[in-house]
Amino acid sequence: MHRGLRGRVAAVALTVLAAAGTLAACGDGGGGSEGDAPLRLGYFPNITHATALVGVEKGIFAEHLGAAPKTATFNAGPAAVEALFSGAIDATFVGPNPSINAWSKSHGKAVHIISGAASGGVSLVVKPGIKGAGDLRGKKIATPQLGNTQDVALRYWLKKNGLTANKDGSGDVKVVPQENAQTLQTFAQGDIDGAWVPEPFASRLILENKGERLLDEKSLWPGGKFVITNLLVSQEYEKKHPEQVEKLLQGVVEATDFINRNRADAEKVTNDALAKLSGKPLKQDVLAAAFKEIDFTTDPVASSLVGGARHAEEIGLLEKTDLAGIYNLAPLNDVLKAGGKAQVSDR
């Protein structure tokens, strides 16, 4: 899922090579000279990236860009960010914390967030019998990765509830970073007592493993809105190809509209895309439940990204970071204005 506040410096070279290999394997577009080469777009095979899945599968991005983008899929934010840094891709859908990390590591010189994609869709799911934060003392709770968006949210929430959760696994609550697919197994086996995870894993824990939703993260944010996926672009590409960036954003707006106006069709398109990428579609009940938890929107919910960064700083998982300038929403707002839609804010 959307993961990691800190890149693994020693693994950068391997990550870049892996990203390039994935790009070659997943490319949809043709070749061409540098001037007319298709945009190279990254995203995850996740429901929270349905905007990308629909945009690619329905040909919406291809229609606006004039050619199908070359696509690369990733399973973790750091890998997507390193691919962007290396020039293997031009833009990627990714979570808020990897976006913050990319901005921080490049000192604000490499990337911009140019659109939102999804809000919500994260829950704390636990074993029956756990009724509140106090019941978590002495328990094991999984998150996708140390320092990722959900990991920060859990540790900050525990701290606000008077519970400690140290990075070395000690404290009142033992936080266990592990892959989401592994969490499904460890929860079913009774090796963990709960997990703070995004969709569709939260719904799968509930519907397939008899977990109970202790907390919907929406309840912690004003208006129930918080960013789970946004669109990050290379500043170099942004400067060289502003027209293509605008066309990509036109596609993002149309794909978002399609999802919100044709929910049943969007669910099917998304599930078909997931089946192609992972080899296995989601069960219909899980698919429907997960979609209900997510708000697909071009609004980046900027206040929640800033809030999440401050939370990470407070629990010692991020150094003080100035986020001024991380957004460039002018192209998106031009597209929204042209379509008679409300503009979005970077605050």
Image (spheres, rainbow, N blue to C red):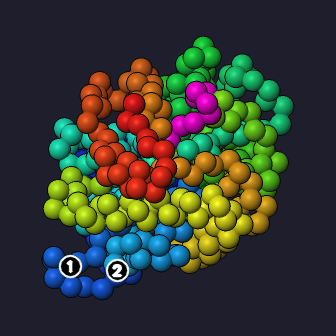
Q: Locate residue 309 relative to residue 286 in the image: left or right.
A: left
Query: 48 or 312, which lies in front?
Result: 48
189 or 245: nearer the eye?
245
| Relative vertical location of residue 261 with respect to residue 268 in this rendering, above or below | above
Secondary structure state at the residue bearing disc 2: loop
Residue on which disc 2 sits: 67
Instruction: Where is residue 86? Give x, y as percent.
Output: 21, 60
Give me the residue at 71% from left, 40% from top. Answer: 125
Identify the residue at image location x=41%, y=50%: 337
Q: Amino acid at mark 1?
A: Asp
User: Does 31 sit above or below residue 284?
Assistant: below
Q: Is residue 10 left or right of residue 336?
A: left
Front position in the image: 156 or 271: 271
Magenta range: 220-227
Q: Residues within 10 Å of mark 2 (few under 14, many from 20)?
A: some
From the image, tell me which residue sits under label 1.
36
**Drawn side of residue 60 relative to residue 39, left or right:** right
Q: Percent position (x, y) of residue 157? A: 58, 24
Q: Earlier in the sequence, mark 2 or mark 1?
A: 1
* Amino acid type of the residue that numbered disc 2 sits on in the rendered structure: Ala
Q: Residue at x 31, y 41 (%)?
A: 327
